[in-house]
Amino acid sequence: MALKEMIATKFDLKMLSKNPRQKSALLINPPVYDTQYWAEWSQPYGILRIGALLKKHHYKRIELFDFMETDETGKVHRHKINPEESYEERDNPTKPIRPYEITKNGEVLELYKYHFGKTWPEFGAWLQEQGLTAKNPPDEIYISAIMSYWWESARDLILRLRRRFGQKSTIILGGIYPTLVPEHAAEHTAADIVVAGEVEEANGLWTDLSFYRRAPQYAIVTPSRGCPFSCAYCASKTLNGGKQVVRYRPVDDIIAEMKYKYETYGIRDFAFYADFLLWRFEENFMKVLERIVREKLPFRLYAPEGLDVSLLSRSQKLVDLLKRANFQKIYLPCESIDDQLLRSMDRRHVRLEHLVRAAKMCEKAGFRLRNLEVNSFLLYGLPGEKIGHVVKTIIFVSEIVGSIIPMLFTPVPSTAIYNRYFSYFQKQGWDRDLHMLNGKLYPFLKMNEGSISDYVDLQRLMFMLNSHYRSKSFQLFGDTLVSTSFRENLNNGFSAVVDKYKQIGFLKPTEVLKDKEATTPEEET
């Protein structure tokens, strides 16, 4: 079949054969291949809405296998794997296991790659337990692939399914990865149908958590879809069919979904995922918050993707409502304090003053700064960035907010930045090896001024400034004598004394340090 024939830009269940009431379907959230992974808020809400859609059409049997389902402690299994090695047939990596080697100017950074999530043997045993064999295959298999740099696990999963079921099952691959690069997905996976874009009939459906044997401890709610802006690093426009329109769900429907999940599964923790949560907030999101407050609903709320500071900073009433509705944490994007860099990313609607005002408003509402209640995303690893500018941004965010969330930049296919540097990616072969665009592998390292040590030090600096003692982080520009003395010692020549003492070597066996030669750094200054 030609690649274009495999790609469905407007997928509909009517495209498939047989009566739904006679069909079985298998839903799968694949494992993750990466150097790091955070399991928090990782519920596969796309595939769970597809499950709800299949139920709506009365499928005879629907099963879910979520490789990334966490255990009782909120963690997922991990084991090391080899870069560039396929696991379509083998369960374990070839020994010895090799790391990625990131190199620049003679420096080498070794990063191990991991398989995160349930193992291939666990998956095979589960299929057997469900009676899903070559003689009894599911009619359809739906797979949701998220990050484009995680594409390899989707490839391996589909090839394994092909070995088990042959061509008896129709494999449908959807999600962010095939939407952004449908031709890549069609060429490099063995899916029958590659869904590029939304499944419109599933958009307004609630995620169906009944497929889990153990009820999840939280739920993801998507109040809206779409974004009015087109930032150079964001793929929202592509993911929403080229539209720059925000579509908000009815407030009653959002509240009803949350109530149902609380009453049915005992869920109190809800994470709002939306491209632009605060769009026209007075008529949309504030109405949701007001209902939660008025009805005294016992929820704990989060917005892990962040709240746009240009809108948040407009309304103290909105920020107060976030607190009254029991928002647990606030995430404020601050990609950089470099205005020129922000303009190059088409972030023209956001200014630095918005972050400062939003942080102050959060504090006024009762959220505590400097102790992880209010956090700020900091984007680095961007093409052409200056280390000095990143350091200034780190210091500024630490001073204003007190908690930094480091985010290494990943060039996302279909975005303006990806297209701007496509020829560079093509020369490296990364237009095929999309996993090499993972920000954790520093794809722009060789064209930026910073060394490997510089980028590692940036992370050290952020983690150091995030360190807490007695519920607060240290404030570099604070009013205490310690803060004042710290700043003074950076500028009073004390660094020269430190440098002098760093040059001292070991005593030779015949040497004795005389008392009169001994001085203290304090005496020297």
Image (spheres, rainbow, N blue to C red):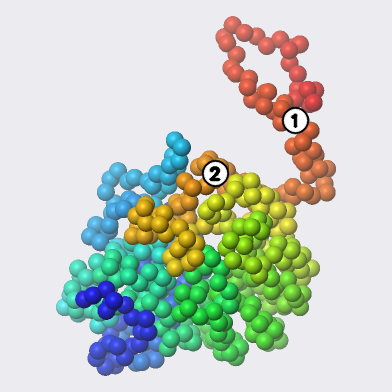
Residue at the spot 31% in from the left edge and 77% down from the top edge: 7
User: What amino acid is at disc 2?
Assistant: Gly
In three-dimensional space, the C-alpha distance between marks 1 and 2, rounded to whole angstroms, equals 26 Å
Q: Which residue is mark 1?
A: 494
In percent of the image, x 38 and y 89: which residue is there? 55
User: Which is nearer the eye, 333 or 419?
Assistant: 419
Q: Left or right: where does residue 202 sit relative to residue 315?
A: left
As helix, strand or loop, the secondary structure at mark 1 comes to helix
Compared to residue 433, the image places residue 284 above or below, namely below
In the rendering, at what x and y percent does residue 31 appear? 37, 64
Q: Residue furthest top?
A: 510
Q: Is residue 111 above or below residue 56?
A: above
> On the picture, is 396 further left or further right than 276?
right
Query: Residue 349 appears at what percent x and percent y?
Result: 66, 70
Where's residue 80, x and y in %? 36, 51
Residue 37's mark?
none
- Mark 1 vs mark 2, foreground winner is 2
Instruction: Look at label 1 and name its amino acid.
Output: Phe
The residue where tag 2 is placed is 450
State whether residue 503 is above or below residue 169: above
Say which quadrant the C terminus sits in.
top right
Q: Secondary structure at mark 2?
A: loop
Provide residue 146's location: percent of width, then percent of height: 42, 69
